[in-house]
Amino acid sequence: MLVLETLLQGAVDTLFVLIILVIAKKIRDARFRSTVQSEGGNAEEQSADYQIEEASNLAVALRRGGLSIGFGFGLAGVVSGGVVRFSAGMEAVLEDMLELAGYCGLLLIFLFVAEIIADQIILRTIRNTVEIKNRNEAVGLAEFGIFVATGLIAYGSFHGDGGGWETALGFFAMGQAALILFAVLYEAAAPFQMVEQIKQGNSAAGLMLGGTLVTLGVILCFAIAGPFTTWSEGIYGFAVSAGVGMALLIPFQKLIDRVFLPNTTLKIEVERDKNIAACAVTVSLQVALAIMIGSLVAV
Protein backbone atom coordinates (compact mmCIF):
# COMPACT_ATOMS: atom_id res chain seq x y z
CA MET A 1 0.00 0.00 0.00
CA LEU A 2 2.85 2.36 0.82
CA VAL A 3 4.36 1.79 -2.63
CA LEU A 4 1.02 2.49 -4.35
CA GLU A 5 0.47 5.62 -2.26
CA THR A 6 3.97 6.87 -3.08
CA LEU A 7 3.43 6.15 -6.79
CA LEU A 8 0.08 7.95 -6.83
CA GLN A 9 1.51 10.86 -4.83
CA GLY A 10 4.43 11.18 -7.22
CA ALA A 11 2.16 11.05 -10.28
CA VAL A 12 -0.17 13.75 -8.95
CA ASP A 13 2.66 16.03 -7.83
CA THR A 14 4.50 15.59 -11.14
CA LEU A 15 1.36 16.37 -13.14
CA PHE A 16 0.80 19.45 -11.00
CA VAL A 17 4.35 20.69 -11.63
CA LEU A 18 4.01 20.01 -15.37
CA ILE A 19 0.91 22.21 -15.45
CA ILE A 20 2.92 25.01 -13.79
CA LEU A 21 5.70 24.53 -16.35
CA VAL A 22 3.24 24.68 -19.25
CA ILE A 23 1.83 27.96 -17.94
CA ALA A 24 5.36 29.35 -17.58
CA LYS A 25 6.23 28.18 -21.11
CA LYS A 26 3.21 29.98 -22.57
CA ILE A 27 4.22 33.21 -20.84
CA ARG A 28 7.85 32.96 -21.97
CA ASP A 29 6.87 32.05 -25.55
CA ALA A 30 4.61 35.09 -25.71
CA ARG A 31 7.47 37.29 -24.49
CA PHE A 32 9.85 35.72 -27.04
CA ARG A 33 7.41 36.34 -29.88
CA SER A 34 6.71 39.94 -28.87
CA THR A 35 10.44 40.70 -28.68
CA VAL A 36 11.40 39.29 -32.08
CA GLN A 37 8.33 40.63 -33.92
CA SER A 38 10.11 43.97 -34.32
CA GLU A 39 12.74 42.19 -36.41
CA GLY A 40 10.16 41.20 -39.01
CA GLY A 41 10.25 37.91 -40.91
CA ASN A 42 7.85 35.02 -41.15
CA ALA A 43 5.33 34.99 -38.30
CA GLU A 44 5.78 31.26 -37.77
CA GLU A 45 9.53 31.70 -37.30
CA GLN A 46 8.88 34.08 -34.40
CA SER A 47 7.78 31.12 -32.27
CA ALA A 48 10.25 29.58 -29.83
CA ASP A 49 8.76 26.16 -30.61
CA TYR A 50 9.45 26.65 -34.31
CA GLN A 51 13.02 27.74 -33.58
CA ILE A 52 13.65 24.55 -31.59
CA GLU A 53 11.63 22.00 -33.57
CA GLU A 54 12.04 23.17 -37.16
CA ALA A 55 15.04 25.51 -37.20
CA SER A 56 17.10 23.38 -34.75
CA ASN A 57 18.15 26.59 -33.01
CA LEU A 58 20.47 25.49 -30.19
CA ALA A 59 20.61 28.98 -28.66
CA VAL A 60 16.85 28.99 -28.02
CA ALA A 61 17.04 25.43 -26.67
CA LEU A 62 19.83 26.43 -24.27
CA ARG A 63 17.70 29.24 -22.85
CA ARG A 64 14.72 26.96 -22.37
CA GLY A 65 16.90 24.19 -20.93
CA GLY A 66 18.55 26.53 -18.44
CA LEU A 67 15.18 27.83 -17.27
CA SER A 68 13.86 24.28 -16.89
CA ILE A 69 16.87 23.07 -14.89
CA GLY A 70 16.76 26.22 -12.77
CA PHE A 71 13.08 25.57 -12.03
CA GLY A 72 13.91 21.98 -11.12
CA PHE A 73 16.56 23.02 -8.61
CA GLY A 74 14.26 25.61 -7.07
CA LEU A 75 11.37 23.17 -6.85
CA ALA A 76 13.63 20.63 -5.13
CA GLY A 77 14.22 23.24 -2.45
CA VAL A 78 10.48 23.81 -2.08
CA VAL A 79 9.64 20.12 -1.55
CA SER A 80 12.79 19.27 0.43
CA GLY A 81 10.79 19.43 3.64
CA GLY A 82 8.43 16.73 2.36
CA VAL A 83 4.89 16.71 1.03
CA VAL A 84 1.61 15.74 2.66
CA ARG A 85 0.60 12.18 1.74
CA PHE A 86 -2.92 11.11 0.78
CA SER A 87 -3.18 9.10 3.99
CA ALA A 88 -3.37 12.45 5.83
CA GLY A 89 -6.68 13.21 4.12
CA MET A 90 -7.69 15.15 1.02
CA GLU A 91 -8.16 18.41 2.91
CA ALA A 92 -4.55 18.33 4.11
CA VAL A 93 -3.33 17.34 0.63
CA LEU A 94 -5.22 20.18 -1.06
CA GLU A 95 -3.91 22.68 1.48
CA ASP A 96 -0.36 21.45 0.84
CA MET A 97 -0.82 21.70 -2.94
CA LEU A 98 -2.11 25.27 -2.64
CA GLU A 99 0.98 26.16 -0.66
CA LEU A 100 3.13 24.40 -3.28
CA ALA A 101 1.39 26.39 -6.02
CA GLY A 102 2.23 29.61 -4.22
CA TYR A 103 5.89 28.69 -3.91
CA CYS A 104 5.96 27.61 -7.58
CA GLY A 105 4.58 31.01 -8.52
CA LEU A 106 7.28 32.70 -6.45
CA LEU A 107 9.91 30.50 -8.10
CA LEU A 108 8.70 31.51 -11.57
CA ILE A 109 8.97 35.16 -10.53
CA PHE A 110 12.55 34.46 -9.43
CA LEU A 111 13.38 33.06 -12.88
CA PHE A 112 11.69 35.96 -14.68
CA VAL A 113 13.80 38.30 -12.54
CA ALA A 114 16.87 36.34 -13.61
CA GLU A 115 15.92 36.89 -17.26
CA ILE A 116 15.76 40.64 -16.65
CA ILE A 117 19.10 40.58 -14.83
CA ALA A 118 20.70 38.63 -17.68
CA ASP A 119 19.36 41.01 -20.30
CA GLN A 120 19.69 44.35 -18.55
CA ILE A 121 22.71 43.94 -16.27
CA ILE A 122 25.04 41.01 -16.90
CA LEU A 123 24.73 41.11 -20.72
CA ARG A 124 23.65 44.71 -20.81
CA THR A 125 25.03 45.57 -24.27
CA ILE A 126 23.31 42.62 -25.95
CA ARG A 127 19.71 42.21 -27.11
CA ASN A 128 19.54 38.69 -25.73
CA THR A 129 16.31 37.43 -27.28
CA VAL A 130 17.11 38.80 -30.72
CA GLU A 131 20.63 37.34 -30.59
CA ILE A 132 19.27 33.98 -29.49
CA LYS A 133 16.73 33.99 -32.31
CA ASN A 134 19.64 34.72 -34.65
CA ARG A 135 21.44 31.59 -33.36
CA ASN A 136 23.98 33.26 -31.09
CA GLU A 137 24.86 30.19 -29.03
CA ALA A 138 27.27 32.20 -26.88
CA VAL A 139 24.33 34.16 -25.46
CA GLY A 140 22.42 30.90 -25.00
CA LEU A 141 25.30 29.38 -23.03
CA ALA A 142 25.67 32.47 -20.86
CA GLU A 143 21.93 32.54 -20.12
CA PHE A 144 21.94 28.79 -19.44
CA GLY A 145 24.51 29.34 -16.71
CA ILE A 146 22.69 32.35 -15.27
CA PHE A 147 19.41 30.43 -14.99
CA VAL A 148 20.99 27.30 -13.49
CA ALA A 149 22.84 29.48 -10.97
CA THR A 150 19.54 31.20 -10.16
CA GLY A 151 17.91 27.80 -9.61
CA LEU A 152 20.69 26.82 -7.21
CA ILE A 153 20.22 30.07 -5.29
CA ALA A 154 16.46 29.44 -5.21
CA TYR A 155 17.09 25.93 -3.87
CA GLY A 156 19.08 27.35 -0.98
CA SER A 157 16.48 30.07 -0.39
CA PHE A 158 13.61 27.58 -0.05
CA HIS A 159 15.53 24.80 1.70
CA GLY A 160 15.65 24.44 5.47
CA ASP A 161 13.40 24.84 8.47
CA GLY A 162 12.33 28.01 10.22
CA GLY A 163 11.79 30.21 7.18
CA GLY A 164 8.94 31.23 4.92
CA TRP A 165 8.08 33.57 2.06
CA GLU A 166 10.00 36.48 3.54
CA THR A 167 13.22 34.50 4.11
CA ALA A 168 13.04 32.99 0.61
CA LEU A 169 12.68 36.48 -0.89
CA GLY A 170 15.42 37.93 1.29
CA PHE A 171 18.05 35.27 0.63
CA PHE A 172 17.19 35.08 -3.06
CA ALA A 173 17.71 38.84 -3.35
CA MET A 174 21.06 38.57 -1.58
CA GLY A 175 22.06 35.67 -3.81
CA GLN A 176 21.19 37.54 -6.99
CA ALA A 177 23.08 40.61 -5.77
CA ALA A 178 26.13 38.43 -5.15
CA LEU A 179 25.76 36.87 -8.61
CA ILE A 180 25.65 40.30 -10.26
CA LEU A 181 28.65 41.53 -8.26
CA PHE A 182 30.65 38.45 -9.17
CA ALA A 183 29.75 38.78 -12.85
CA VAL A 184 31.06 42.36 -12.80
CA LEU A 185 34.26 41.34 -10.99
CA TYR A 186 34.78 38.34 -13.27
CA GLU A 187 34.39 40.44 -16.40
CA ALA A 188 36.88 42.98 -15.03
CA ALA A 189 39.41 40.24 -14.16
CA ALA A 190 39.06 38.34 -17.45
CA PRO A 191 42.03 38.70 -19.83
CA PHE A 192 39.63 39.53 -22.68
CA GLN A 193 36.40 41.47 -23.18
CA MET A 194 33.95 38.81 -22.03
CA VAL A 195 30.62 40.40 -22.97
CA GLU A 196 31.94 41.71 -26.29
CA GLN A 197 33.16 38.21 -27.22
CA ILE A 198 29.72 36.80 -26.36
CA LYS A 199 28.06 39.49 -28.46
CA GLN A 200 30.24 38.42 -31.39
CA GLY A 201 29.03 34.84 -31.01
CA ASN A 202 32.09 33.34 -29.32
CA SER A 203 30.62 30.23 -27.66
CA ALA A 204 33.80 29.63 -25.67
CA ALA A 205 33.30 32.98 -23.92
CA GLY A 206 29.61 32.19 -23.33
CA LEU A 207 30.55 28.85 -21.77
CA MET A 208 33.16 30.48 -19.54
CA LEU A 209 30.77 33.12 -18.22
CA GLY A 210 27.80 30.79 -17.83
CA GLY A 211 29.88 28.00 -16.30
CA THR A 212 31.66 30.30 -13.87
CA LEU A 213 28.35 31.73 -12.67
CA VAL A 214 27.14 28.16 -12.06
CA THR A 215 30.19 27.60 -9.85
CA LEU A 216 29.24 30.63 -7.76
CA GLY A 217 25.63 29.40 -7.71
CA VAL A 218 26.84 26.13 -6.17
CA ILE A 219 28.69 28.01 -3.41
CA LEU A 220 25.74 30.35 -2.76
CA CYS A 221 23.40 27.35 -2.58
CA PHE A 222 25.53 25.88 0.22
CA ALA A 223 25.77 29.28 1.89
CA ILE A 224 22.01 29.88 1.95
CA ALA A 225 20.62 26.38 2.56
CA GLY A 226 19.96 25.31 6.10
CA PRO A 227 17.72 26.17 9.03
CA PHE A 228 16.85 29.83 9.54
CA THR A 229 17.54 31.22 12.99
CA THR A 230 17.73 35.01 12.92
CA TRP A 231 18.24 37.59 10.18
CA SER A 232 21.48 38.85 11.72
CA GLU A 233 23.02 35.38 11.82
CA GLY A 234 21.69 34.51 8.37
CA ILE A 235 22.97 37.68 6.70
CA TYR A 236 26.36 37.46 8.41
CA GLY A 237 26.79 33.80 7.50
CA PHE A 238 25.77 34.43 3.90
CA ALA A 239 28.09 37.42 3.55
CA VAL A 240 31.07 35.48 4.89
CA SER A 241 30.37 32.41 2.74
CA ALA A 242 29.71 34.40 -0.44
CA GLY A 243 32.75 36.61 0.15
CA VAL A 244 35.06 33.65 0.70
CA GLY A 245 33.67 31.89 -2.36
CA MET A 246 34.13 34.90 -4.64
CA ALA A 247 37.60 35.55 -3.24
CA LEU A 248 38.69 32.00 -4.03
CA LEU A 249 37.08 31.35 -7.40
CA ILE A 250 38.97 33.76 -9.65
CA PRO A 251 42.49 33.02 -8.30
CA PHE A 252 41.84 29.28 -8.39
CA GLN A 253 40.57 29.52 -11.95
CA LYS A 254 43.94 30.96 -12.93
CA LEU A 255 45.64 28.08 -11.09
CA ILE A 256 43.42 25.54 -12.87
CA ASP A 257 44.35 27.05 -16.22
CA ARG A 258 48.07 26.85 -15.44
CA VAL A 259 47.90 23.23 -14.28
CA PHE A 260 45.38 21.72 -16.69
CA LEU A 261 46.08 23.92 -19.75
CA PRO A 262 49.87 24.01 -19.39
CA ASN A 263 50.73 24.77 -23.01
CA THR A 264 48.44 27.71 -23.57
CA THR A 265 46.47 30.49 -21.84
CA LEU A 266 42.77 31.08 -21.36
CA LYS A 267 43.00 34.30 -23.36
CA ILE A 268 44.39 32.42 -26.37
CA GLU A 269 41.90 29.56 -26.08
CA VAL A 270 38.85 31.84 -25.75
CA GLU A 271 39.67 34.97 -27.72
CA ARG A 272 41.80 33.59 -30.55
CA ASP A 273 40.93 29.89 -30.87
CA LYS A 274 37.33 29.98 -29.55
CA ASN A 275 38.15 26.59 -28.06
CA ILE A 276 35.03 25.22 -26.36
CA ALA A 277 36.83 22.00 -25.38
CA ALA A 278 39.45 23.85 -23.32
CA CYS A 279 36.75 25.95 -21.66
CA ALA A 280 34.72 22.83 -20.85
CA VAL A 281 37.72 21.40 -18.98
CA THR A 282 38.15 24.62 -16.99
CA VAL A 283 34.46 24.96 -16.17
CA SER A 284 34.14 21.30 -15.08
CA LEU A 285 37.06 21.67 -12.69
CA GLN A 286 35.63 24.94 -11.38
CA VAL A 287 32.32 23.24 -10.55
CA ALA A 288 34.14 20.44 -8.74
CA LEU A 289 36.12 23.05 -6.81
CA ALA A 290 32.94 24.99 -6.02
CA ILE A 291 31.32 21.90 -4.49
CA MET A 292 34.29 21.53 -2.15
CA ILE A 293 34.41 25.26 -1.30
CA GLY A 294 30.65 25.28 -0.73
CA SER A 295 30.81 22.39 1.71
CA LEU A 296 33.61 24.14 3.61
CA VAL A 297 31.94 27.54 3.90
CA ALA A 298 28.39 26.30 4.45
CA VAL A 299 26.78 27.93 7.46
Image (tube, rainbow, N blue to C red):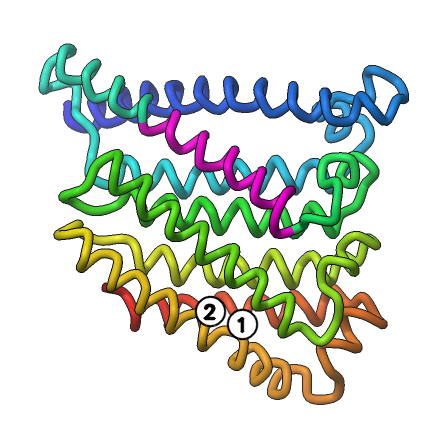
Say above or below: 136 vs 233: above
Tell me which amino acid carries mark 2. Answer: Ala
Please give the residue where the numbered disc 1 appears in the rendered image.
285
Marks 1 and 2: in contact by CB < 8 Å? yes
Rate crowding at label 2 as few (under 14), some (14 to 19) or many (20 or more) other CA atoms within 10 Å. few
As for residue 3 lying within the magenta part, the answer is no
Tell me where residue 267 sits by quadrant. Answer: bottom right
As for residue 115 lying within the magenta part, the answer is yes
Residue sitting at the far left: 88
Tell me which amino acid carries mark 1. Answer: Leu
Residue, x 71% and y 63% (percent of image)? Answer: 194
Residue, x 47% and y 62% (percent of image)? Answer: 216
Task: Locate residue 68, reporting x and y percent.
Answer: 52, 36
* SS of the residue under disc 2: helix
Give the magenta part as a residue range: 103-122
Tell me where residue 84 sits by quadrant. Answer: top left
Residue 288: give its label: 2
In this rendering, position of residue 69 left or right of residue 292:
right
- Asked if residue 89 can be seen in this view, the reply is yes
In this rendering, position of residue 5 left or right of residue 285:
left
Residue, x 63% and y 60% (percent of image)? Answer: 209
Residue, x 60% and y 25% (percent of image)? Answer: 28
* SS of the residue under disc 1: helix
Cα separation between marks 2 and 1: 5 Å
Q: Quadrant of the N terminus?
A: top left
Task: Locate residue 224, reporting x and y percent.
Answer: 30, 55
Tell me where residue 278 sits by quadrant. Answer: bottom right
In the image, 241 versus 100, the foreground residue is 241
